[in-house]
Image: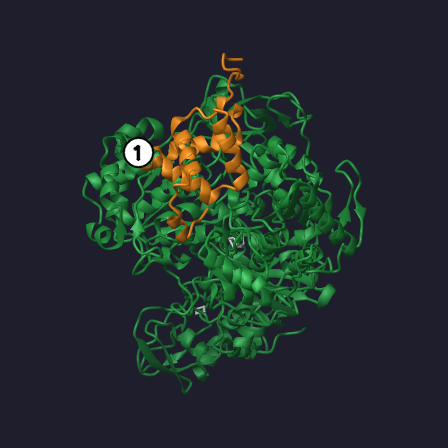
Chain colours: A green, B orange
Amino acid sequence: MTVPPPTMLAQQVAALGDDAQRHPDPTGTPYLPEPDLGTPRVEGTAEVTVSVDGREVVVPGGTSVLRAAREAGVDVPSLCATDSLRAFGSCRLCLVEVEGGKGVPASCTTPCADGMVVRTDTEQVQRLRRGVMELYLTDHPVDCPGCARGTCEIQALARRTGVAEVRYGLPAAGSGPASRVDGGASRDTTNPYFDYDPQACIVCSRCVRACADVQGTFALTVEGRGLASRIAPGPTEFIASECVSCGACVQACPTEALVEKSLVQLGMPTRAVETTCAYCGVGCTFRAEVQGAAEETRVVRMTPLKAGGANEGHSCVKGRFAYGYAAHDDRQLRPMVRESIEDEWRVVSWEEAIGRVAEGFRGIQERHGVGAVGGISSSRCTNEEVYVVQKMVRAAFGNNNIDTCARVCHSPTGYGLNQTFGTSAGTQDFESVDHTDVMLLIGANPTDAHPVFGSRMKQRLRKGAQIIVADPRRIDLVRSPHVQAAHHLPLLPGSNVAFINAMAHVVVTEGLHDEEFLRDRCEDVDAYLEFARDEGNSPEATAEATGLDPEQLRAAARLYASAPNASIYYGLGVTEHSQGSTMVMGLANLAMLTGNIGRRGVGVNPLRGQNNVQGSCDMGSFPHELPGYRHISRPEVRAIYEDLWQVRLDPEPGLRIPNMFDAALGGTFRGLFVHGEDIAQSDPNLQHVRAALSAMELVVVQDLFLNETARYAHVFLPGSSFLEKDGTFTNAERRLGRVRPIMPSKVGKDEWQIVCEIATAMGFPMSYGSASQIMDEIAATTPTFAGVSFERLDREGSMQWPVNEAAPSGTPTMHVEEFVRGRGRLVPTVFVPTTERTNRRFPLILTTGRILTQYNVGAQTRRTANSTWHPEDVLEIHPSDAELRGIRSGDTVELSSRVGTTALTALVSDRMQPGVVYTTFHHPVTGANVVTTENSDWATNCPEYKVTAVQVAVANAREGRHTDGRAGRDLGVSDAHEPIDPAVPFSVAGSGR
Amino acid sequence: MSAAGVEEGHDPRELLSPEVRLGGDIARALAHLGEDAPTEIATHLRKFWDPRMRAAILERLRAGEIEDPLLRAGVEAYLEGEVDRGEVREPSGG
Ligand code: SF4
Ligand code: SF4
Ligand code: FES
C-alpha cells in the first residue's frame, strides 16, 4: 500500500512561502494537495507570539494553536479541522500540552495567547493520540482505496501517530462503521460527479459544515447516533436531494467517503496548474489537477484554490465539474469552408481557411466599401484575444465595426456608470459584501447565476446583514434555509426606473439623504433633489406601474438609507430593458444620495454574466471606444495606437451588433467575423438575426462547436477551450486572473494567432511571440492597465484594475476620495414606460433568466452531465394563469409573441406573480429568443430581453417548434444534439477526439 | 389589421425604420431635458451612431418621415453641427 510520507504536511507548509509553488509557471508544478492550516485565518487582531515545540511564531491573536503550529512548520495531526471551516473540536486528534495549562486541549479550538508555550509531541500527547487513532482505525476499512491512493488521510495519520497495531481488532475488508451497525449502507453513486461511500466515513462532519457554512445550502445532516451515525443528504439520495453539487463537501472530506468519480476512474493527478474558471463573471480560481503532458494531458479534477481572490476555496457545479465539454466529440478541430450555406462543409488547411477569410473580406470591401465588414469579439475569450480582435477590426479592416456580446447584457452598465461615476465598472471587490449591513439586490439571481458569490452573500446574511430583493420572481434569496429577505418587492417587469425613483423619493422627502456627501462629492445635486421630490415619483404615484405596495417600498427605502453600510448588487434584470441605462444611473444616484460609495461594504456592483464581460469591454470592444473606455474621436488617444500600429484609425464610431444586422438587411454590411459567440441563439428576435446573417456574403465563425450561428457561416475556424489558453480574464470585481494552458491547443494554433494571421493576410502585419506580449501592449497603451503583466500576475496573484502608478497593487474599492470623473453626477431618471405592452392578443409578460447548472446558450454545459438537472428549458407560469388556460405542469405549451412562436414544457409555479411568465434560454430547441423582440435600451441598443408581451396556450405537437410571428415559417435548429453521455466529463482526455 | 395597417397585437413602431425607431427611443429618454434636449440628442447620435445610421436618419428627415417633433429637432441640431464635442473627453461607456 502506498501511503504518502508523513512529512507531506511539512512539504505543503514549506511550499506556502514559496512563490513558485503558489503561482506556478504555465506548465504547472508536481501535484501536492493544497496546504491545510487547520483553521481559518484570523484578521484584525493584535499580533501575539507563541512558542510551539521551541519554535517562535507570530500570529494574529485568536488564531488557533493548531494553525500557529502549522504556520511554524510543526505538523500536528488533525481530522475534523480544516482551514475553510470554523473548528469543531470533535476528533480529539490534535491534542497538545500548554505550559501552565490544564490537561491536553484540542489545539484547533484553543486560541493563541501572547507568550504561550505549546508542546505537541510529549509522551502523554502521543499516547492519547494513539488511542484516538486506534479507535478511528477500528472503524475504517483496511482496504480503503483512498488510503491506497493517498487521498484518504486515515492510514497516513496512523503512521504519523505511530499506531502500529490496533488493540480492538481491525474490521474485515469491505466493512466499515456503518456496515457493522446498520447492516451495510451502500454507496450512493447517484450524483453524476461524485460518490458517497458510508463505509469510509468517519463522521467528522466536515462535509455537513461545509455545506452549511460555506455553501449555505444545508443539504447534509448527520443521521443516527454513535457508531451507527452517518451523513445523509436528507431522507433521499444525493441526486434527488437539495444538494447543488458545488463540491464543497468533497473538498472538505478527509477520507474518500466523498470522492470525485473522475479521481476514482483516473487515479491521482501528477501535476497541478492554477487557472481561472471560464464560466461566469465571478471568476473563481481553480487548480486543474491533471495527468500526463502535452497532447496526452488529462484533467483528473478541478479544485477551487484557497488563495483564489474571488472564491477563496469555494466553487459551483459548473466550474468544479462541468469541464468535460472541452474534450467532447462535438468539438471541431479542423478549419472548414463552404461556398454557400446550403453546401456541405469541406475540411481545409489553415492556410486555405485564412486565405479565404482575408480575400473574402477584402473583396467585400472593394465592392461595397471599407465599412461593409466587421467583427464581434467574445466575452468568453481572454483579454488578449479580445484585444487582438478589436485591433484586427480597427487596423486591418480599417473601420470601427467591432462590438462584443456585452452589447446584449451589460452595455447599459458601461453607459450608466460612466455617466455618473466616470468609469464602466463595479465599485467594489467581492470581499466588500462581508462588511455590508443592507444589500439591495435587483434583477439578479446570484444563487443560480453567480453561485459562489451567492454563497458569500448568504454567509453575510446569516451573520446578520439584511437583504431587500427587488425581483418579479421569488428567487432563492427571498427565502432559503437560514435566509429571509427583509423585503421582497415583486415589481412588474419594465418598471425598474419607476421603482428606483420611488426609492429616491422616499429618501429625499424623508430627509434620509447624506447632505455632506452630496455637497462634497457630487454635482447637479439640486436639480436631482427636485426631480426626486416630485410627487409623480412617490411610491403611491408609481404603484400602478410597479405593482408594489407603497408602504413596503417605503420601508425598504428607509432600511437601505439608514444602514451604516448599504450596497447594491444587480444583474441583467436591470440592464436588459428599454431603460436599462437609465436604471443603472438610477442605482448610481441612490448610492450617491445616501453616501454609499467609496468604502468597504457599500457601492454599486454589476454582477457580470460571462467570465470576461468586464474584460471584453475594457479591451476596446465597443465600436466607439478604444481600450480603457476612451472615445474613438479623441485624437490624442487615436495617436497612441496610430503611432504604435502605423496605421490611420477611423475617428467615427462603428456599428453595434443590432446595427450590423439592420445594415446587413439594408445591404451595406456584408461580412462578419464572429468570435466565440452564438448570435443566432443568444440575440433577440432570432428571425431578424437569421435573416441578417443569411443576407451576408461572408460569415466567419470561430468557436469550439458548430453552433447555431455556424449554420449561416461560410468559414468555420476551430477555437481552443480555456484549458488550452494562455491569458487573462477580468471578473465582475475588475480582477485580472491568469488563465493557464494545461495542454497545447487541440487545433494547432492559439486563437490570437489565428486572428493575427487573418490581419496579416489582409495586408496589416500583426504578430506576437506570446499572449504575454499582447498584455504588454495593452499595458503600454492603456493607463488603467499600466502596471499589469503576466510576470506580475504570476508572481503576485490576481489584481483589480486600475493597476498603475497611483495604485501599484490594484484597486479593490473605487471612487474613495473622489470619483473617476471628479464629482459624481446625479442624473434625473425620468420613467418612460416601454412600448412593449400587454394587449388582448398577448396578455402576459415574459421575462427570462438562468439556472444554476446551465450556462448561457448551453453550448458548454449541455455537453456535460449538468444536463442531468436541467435537460430542457421550462416555462414557469402562475397557477391562476395556468388554470385559466387549462395548463398543467408537464404540458407542452405554445409561447407566442408578436415576433414568433416556440413550444416548451410548462411548470406551474407560484414563484411568479400572476400575469408574468418566466423561462431560461439555455437550449436551442426551446429558442426563447424566437419570441423576444427588437426593442432595446435607448442609449446602448442592449435588447429588452426582460419584457415581452406573450400568450401561452396548450400545444398539440412539437413539430416545427420555432415559427416566424408573421409568416409562420419553421425556423429549425441545428445545435440540438441529444443530452450527453454522462460518462463524458470523466474521460477528459487530452488526446483529441 | 387596424386602420394603421398594423396587425392586432403588433407594435405600430415595427413599421418604422430602425434609425427612426431608435431615434424615437432616444428622444423620449431625453425629453425631460427641455430646451437642451435637441442638442443632447444630436450629441448622442454623434457619439454613439455609425455615420451610415446618421446618414439614414438625415434621409428620413429630408423625406419628412420623422413624425416625433423632438427627434426632428434633435436631428436638425445634428445637421447644424451645434454639438458639444467636449463631452467625448469623458470616458463614454456602453
Ligand atoms: S463524508 Fe467525509 S467529510 Fe463527511 S463526515 Fe464523512 S468523512 Fe467527514
Ligand atoms: S461561480 Fe462562476 S466562476 Fe465560480 S465556479 Fe461557478 S461558474 Fe465558475
Ligand atoms: S482537529 Fe482538533 S479536535 Fe479534530
Which image quarter has ligand 3?
bottom left
Q: Element type at marker 1?
A: helix
Horizontal arrangement in the rendering, residue A332 relative to residue B53 (left or right): right
**Residue A397 x %, y %:** 63, 51
The reply, left or right, for residue A963 in relation to residue A334 is left
Q: Position of residue A133 (x, y in %)?
A: 52, 72
Left or right: A63 with respect to A726?
left
| Disc 1 target residue | B34
The spot of residue A524 in percent (x, y) is 26, 46
Question: Quadrant of the rendered structure where residue A152 is?
Answer: bottom right
* Residue A432 position (above or below residue A508): below
Point 70% across, 39% down: residue: A697
Q: What residue occupies the far left of the structure in this picture?
A: A511
| Amino acid type, residue under disc 1 in the picture | Gly
Q: Give the answer, above or below, for where B22 lies relative to A607.
A: above
**Quarter of the figure that contains the N terminus of chain B:** top right
Mark 1: few/some/many CA within 10 Å (<14, 14-19, 20+): few
The vertical placement of A945 against A157, above or below, is: above
For this rendering, which residue is in front, A616 or A310?
A: A616
A312 over A942 or under it: above or below = below
Please give the count of numbered marks on the rendered protein. 1
Q: Chain of mark 1?
A: B
Q: Is residue A182 visible to the viewer in this orientation of the structure? A: no
Front-most of residues A107 and A315:
A315
Q: Is mark 1 within 8 Å of ligand 2?
A: no
Residue A266 is at least partly visible in this image = yes
Question: Observer-nearest residue: A214 or A650?
Answer: A650
Q: Quadrant of residue A554?
A: top left
Q: Residue A245 at what x, y percent from top left?
A: 55, 51
Q: Residue furthest bottom?
A: A54
